[in-house]
Amino acid sequence: MKPINVGLLGIGTVGGGTFAVLKRNQEEIARRAGRGIVINIIADRDIEKARKIAGEDTLITSDANDVVTHPDVSIVVELIGGYTTAKELTLKAIENGKHVVTANKALLALHGTEIFAAAQRKGVMVAFEAAVAGGIPIIKALREGLTANRIEWIAGIINGTSNFILSEMRNKGLGFDAVLKQAQKLGYAEADPAFDIGGIDAAHKITIMAAIAFGIPMQFDKVYTEGIAKLTGEDIRYAEELGYRIKLLGITKRTPKGIELRVHPTLIPSQRLIANVEGVMNAIVVKGDAVGPTLYYGAGAGAEPTASSVVADLVDVTRMHTADPKNRVPHLAFQPDLLSDIPILPMEEVETSYYLRLRVMDKPGVLADISRILADLDISIGAMVQKEPNQGEDQVDIIILTHLTVEKNINSAIIKIEDLPAVIGRVTRIRLEELSSNH
Ligand code: NDP
Ligand code: HSE
């Protein structure tokens, strides 16, 4: 059988990795797919760079429209990133009857509903394994492997750049900016690294996973998002002393009141496997009602790990493109006319535990005042530690861990605690999740 032709948009970090993996493993891949998979045209702004990577046998153009309209191309791989041009090109490829493979989580989190509807009308597939957690086949696991389950919750380290920064800061004592530069050099960071540090990239990914896990539309605008920029070395150290690690987690949870959808730095018990995930590695815990908790681990970014997922999608599309569209796995795991309108919970209604750090005057009655505020708001204290004051100082740090409470109660408590005359400055609040199997 003749090979299937692929058009590649963008031969940067992931595009270059995809080209290399397809070429290196072409025989093995063809044996799996049932025919060869060949990139026959590439669009990139930098033709010289593209030529250097792809050699002389591949058509190279600077006009991406040449790829999405090319009559010989069956699958378009979108690896340019962003959501303006990428959206136009993706929709144009679909209109031209091409299947699409993309690693672009921003595009899908924001415009997935429109893109999947267009693909549905046209009877083509949009595959996006690489869009969440780089090389980990989490989309396949959620959409197919766990299909018997009612998913209860997902919690994941899903931004390699942030995890790399937190790990390097903790293990090597390196500064934030130096580590970020290293992540950019290694090709992990987004074009705008504020997406990584600010939690936006993780918010894109948790939006996609929530849609597939619960059969709901993509609702990126409803994700509560907080990044790692405000984390301090002392919070990382205090957390360790109490038996916790701080990780940037994407969390989505089904509750009787609605679905939680949030990204924020989180204390997790250091004995959990996920707490020990370091560097650019990602890990995702998925709790299903039948299977219980399951853990998926692997490289969350980088050229070839991400290419591994892109190529897996190419093989899937090659195997399935002649199948009746009704018999393919639905884009969001659930049949498109059977999506649920279960609401996303506002952050104020979310229930979790908290780490609070505050600086107070070292004098009698302060702890009693703080305890009273918490008790009045029905917040139960799990642990309270008063650090030794530095020599000659009359101020001390107090660390409080709470049991489960509703976010709006902790917000009220923080306002009242900050109003106490003996409390100096602002209260630092970091959410805490036990991630236990019976949670
Ligand atoms: P890069 O910036 O390394 O590569 C993008 C390439 O596309 C560049 O060569 C760029 O050229 C080119 N390009 C951009 N716009 C156009 C256009 N309009 N026409 C032609 N070429 C264009 O990005 P990555 O490979 O890192 O990321 C690609 C996608 O994969 C993104 O959506 C990203 O979020 C996602 N992703 C990335 C991962 C990673 O580890 N890097 C992991 C998982 C997903 P120029 O440089 O001149 O702008
Ligand atoms: N910038 C992303 C990260 C790339 O660091 O995880 C993978 O999606």
Image (cartoon, helix red, strand yellow):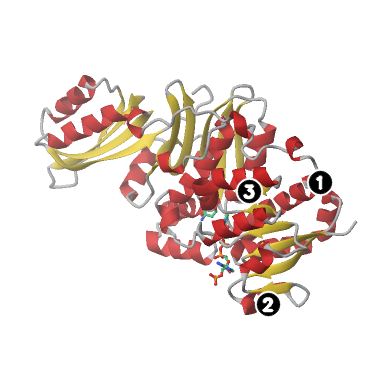
**Which x, y percent locates residue 337?**
61, 31
For the view shown, which residue lies furthest in the bottom direction? 48
From the viewer's perspective, tell me whether residue 54 is left or right of residue 266. Answer: right
Q: Against 38, is 213 above or below?
A: above
Distance in Å between CA atoms under marks 2 and 3: 27 Å
x, y percent for residue 147: 67, 29
Which of disc 1 and disc 2 is earlier in sequence? 2
The residue lying toward the viewer, choosing from 378 and 105, is 105
Q: Which residue is mark 1?
A: 322
Compute the Cα span from label 3 to label 1: 19 Å
Whether pointer 2 and pointer 1 mark residues with C-beta atoms closer than 8 Å, the reply is: no
Residue 205 pos. (x, y %): 52, 45
Q: Residues within 10 Å of mark 3 (few under 14, many from 20)?
A: many
Distance (Cα) linking label 2 and label 1: 34 Å
Depth check: 180 or 342 in front?
342
* Residue type highlighted by circle 2: Lys
Residue tagged 2: 52
Three-letter residue code for mark 3? Phe
SS for dot 3 = loop
298 up-or-down from 431: above or below: below
Amino acid beneath label 1: Thr
Against 317, residue 303 (above or below) is below
Q: Residues within 10 Å of mark 1 (few under 14, many from 20)?
A: few
Question: In front here: 9 or 188?
Answer: 9
**Residue at label 3?**
128
Of all residues, the one furthest to the left in this rendering is 421
Left-right relation of 192 to 296: left
Where 115 sits versus 294, above or below?
A: below
Density class for disc 2 (Cα within 10 Å; few <14, some 14-19, many ≥20) is few
